[in-house]
Amino acid sequence: MKGFDYSEIKEGKFYDRMRPIGKIFDKLQYKIEYVGLENIPKEGGFILASNHMCALDPVFIAIGMEDRQLHFMGKKELFENKIVKFFLTKFNGFPIVRGGADSEALNYAIRIVKEGYVLGIFPEGTRSKDYKPGRAKTGVAVIAKEAKADILPVSIYSSDEMKKHTKLTIRFGEVIPYEKLGINDDSSKEELRECAQYVMSEITELWGKGHCE
C-alpha cells in the first residue's frame, strides 16, 4: 500500500508507554480476565490466532502480553485517515487489501514471524456478527506454511455481546507446533483449508470454556 513502509519491521517505545493507558481504558470500559498467559512464548516468532468480535480485539490481546509486542493486519481503508494511520502504525498495525491478492502485505506478515516477532491474525478474516467463532479462511495456514510458524490459539469470550462494562475472558491456549499443522511446502489448497479449520477448532474449544468461575 502506498504510504506504508514495508521495508523494515519495527517495534518502538511508544507501544510500551501506551500499554498502561490502555489498561486503564479497558478497566473503565470492560472487565477483562486473562487466562493462560504463561503459554505465551518469551522469545521467537510465532502466529497468534484469535476469534474476532470487535475492532478493539488487538488491543485487548496486546495489553495482556506484557513481554511481547503484537503486530497485526488492518484493512487498508483504516490507513487512509492520517490520524488513525499514525496510531495504528505506532501500535505495529499494517494495511492489507481484504478479499484480494496483496502480496506485499502477505510477504510482510511472513517476515514478521521469520524475523522473530509476533503476528496477530484473525483467521475468520472479519468480525463475527453473532459473537461466536466462525469459519476460518486459509490466510493463517498460508502464512504458517511460508514462515514454518508455530501458532498460539487465543479466544475472546463475552456472554453479553461486547456491551459496555461487559466481562471478557481472553484465554491463551497451548502453542501448536508447526509440525502438528499437517502442512508442508507442497500442501494443496484443501490441506491449507483443513489446517485453517484445525486452528479455528482449537480457538473454538478455548472459547467454549467461557468465563472462569
Image (cartoon, rainbow, N blue to C red):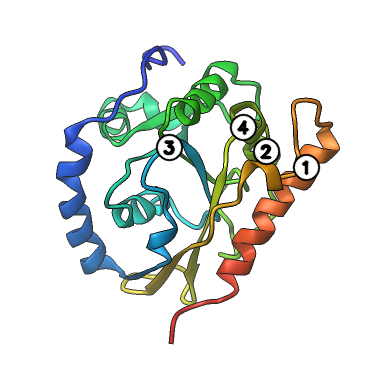
The 10 Å Cα crowd at callout 2, few under 14, some 14 to 19, many 20 or more, is: many
Q: Are the residues tagged 1 and 4 within 8 Å (C-beta)?
A: no
Measured along the vertical axis of the image, is residue 38 above or below residue 81?
Answer: below
Give left or right: position of 17 versus 203. Answer: left
Residue 153, given in percent of the width and then of the height, sits at 55, 55
Q: What element carries label 4?
A: loop
Q: Name the residue under label 4.
A: 148
The 10 Å Cα crowd at callout 4, few under 14, some 14 to 19, many 20 or more, is: many
Q: Measure the C-alpha gap from mark 2 to mark 4.
A: 10 Å
Amino acid beneath label 3: Gly
Q: Residue, x 40% and y 12% (percent of image)?
A: 7
Residue 140, given in percent of the width and then of the height, sits at 62, 39
Q: Mark 3 points at which residue?
A: 44
Task: Indicate which label's residue lies in the foreground, 1 or 4.
Answer: 4
Q: Name the residue under label 2.
A: 141
Q: Residue furthest bottom?
A: 213
Sooner in the amino-acid sequence: mark 3 or mark 2: 3
Amino acid beneath label 1: Arg
Q: Residue, x 65% and y 21% (percent of image)?
A: 101
Sooner in the amino-acid sequence: mark 3 or mark 4: 3
Between 62 and 1, the residue placed more toward the observer is 62
- Using the rendered image of the protein, determine whether residue 133 is visible from the camera's viewpoint: no
Q: Are the residues tagged 2 and 1 within 8 Å (C-beta)?
A: yes
Q: Name the residue under label 1.
A: 193
The 10 Å Cα crowd at callout 3, few under 14, some 14 to 19, many 20 or more, is: some
Q: Is mark 2 on a helix, strand or loop?
A: helix
